[in-house]
Amino acid sequence: MSQASGLAADPASLPSAEDRTYRKVTLRLLPFLFLCYLGAYLDRVNVAFAKLQMLDELKFSEQVYAFGASVFFIGYVLVEVPSNVILHRVGARLWIARIMISWALLSGAMAFVQTPLTFYVMRFLLGVAEAGFIPGVLLYLTYWYPARRRGRITAIFLTAIPMASVFGSPLSGWILNAASGAYGLSGWQWLFLIEAVPSLVLGVVTLFYLDDRVAAAAWLDEDEKRIVAGAVAREEEEKEGLSQLSAAFRTPRVWLLGLIYFGIVCGIYLNSFWVPTIIKQTGVSDPFRIGLLTAVPYLCAVIAMIALNSNADRMRERRWHTLIPCLVTAAGFAFTAWAGGSTVLAMVGLVLAVAGASSAQAAFWSLPGAFLGGTAAAAGIALVNSLGNLAGFTTNNIVGWLAAVTHSNSASLYLFAAVLVASGALVLTIPARLVNK
């Protein structure tokens, strides 16, 4: 036998049965869930681009926009925990489809907003409709992946956030320019209508594509099902008995994680809702060019998220992989504020801020699933996400208020840089033995 054929036959060079099975699982689930979240996040934050036209047309102030953007999170937080518990009981297929179809219809209806009150009501209802999607998918991934494999998978799934801006920002800018006036509708109205379509279609497809549990997956053979179910079951046995619903509310670490995530989400939504405005304030006026520039930090974020969280899985280290991106985000905000009206320097700061916040978010979600299981995982993940997403309400209102008072976003950038430093420091209070898996 030749040396080449001997190397080809070396069992050590071949992937294990578990690796082959998980590659199959990942190819089946991850691209579809990624597309679903891409549509969800685009529908959540496209108001940041609609703002470039709708405020002038509808005579809305910056404070009206800030409150409307943030009231989404009140509806979101109120129903998120019960939404995730329902998903755990009725299954991801039906519940995720319900979420997607309802939010798509409401997002499209945003095109017909005319007054501040209708703007507030529609944003609140959109939050109610979308509540449960992110924690639902994060919970769903715990049904398929043990913690040692879940960091990179979660990071790839969450790259839908920056990818929504990579593709959505130029698309949104183009729609604002190209569709304005068509059939008597403004560009911002077409923006809401067109970008609701993908979520609606994917919501219907979800009913036929997702499987609630491993046992229902007809695309896996029996041996593959045993491999996946066994890997998850072994991890569930190690979770210190934290599997009952009440454990999510009586475990101090869950509330601590909610506080940490609050700070990280401040960074996420400061980027999501205000980056186009920050770029515009540096002197860029064309919506399409603003869209292209907005895409740049998010493209960098995709690379950073996958690289950092792949390294976290390889090293089985979670805390520092969350802390360091928080500090990078803080540095990015401070640099953007210092850059003033320079577009080039502001873009450097925004790249750091967006890549850091996105990477911190992806790394963070390896933490709660590492020590919560069962119904406690369903409620705990939703509770952490709810507490964190209160930042969506807080951040937008603070930024809007400070912008009105100071006529600049610099004060907000410095303030939330400090918040990110504090959140990162709190990560180190979590025992490494609980999360470094």
Image (tube, grey):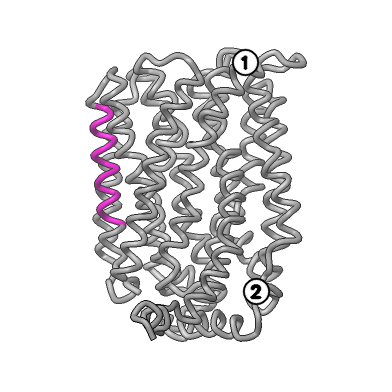
SS label for mark 1: helix
Percent of width and height locating residue 315: 28, 69
Question: Going 54% across and 43% down the picture, which residue do you hit?
Answer: 73
375 is higher (above) or lower (below) than 351: below
Depth check, front residue: 254 or 207? 207
Question: Going 68% across and 64% down the picture, which residue do you hit?
Answer: 210
Horizontally, is 252 left or right of 417 in the view? right
SS label for mark 2: loop
Mark 2 is surrounded, within 10 Å at the Cα level, by few (under 14), some (14 to 19) or many (20 or more) other residues, namely some
Which SS does the magenta portion mostly show?
helix
Depth check, front residue: 218 or 172? 218
Horizontally, is 189 left or right of 314 in the view? right
> What is the quadrant of the N terminus in the image?
bottom left
Label for residue 58?
Answer: 1
Mark 1 is surrounded, within 10 Å at the Cα level, by few (under 14), some (14 to 19) or many (20 or more) other residues, namely few
> What is the quadrant of the C terminus in the image?
bottom left
26 is higher (above) or lower (below) than 424: below
The residue singled out by tag 2 in the image is: 213
Percent of width and height locating residue 235: 45, 81
Which of pointers 1 and 2 lies earlier in the amino acid sequence? 1
Question: Going 48% across and 40% down the picture, which residue do you hit?
Answer: 393
Percent of width and height locating residue 29: 59, 63
Please provide the residue range marked out in magenta: 322-337
Which one is closest to the eye, mark 1 or mark 2? 2
Horizontally, is 263 left or right of 39 in the view? left
Horizontally, is 186 left or right of 145 in the view? right
57 is higher (above) or lower (below) than 309: above
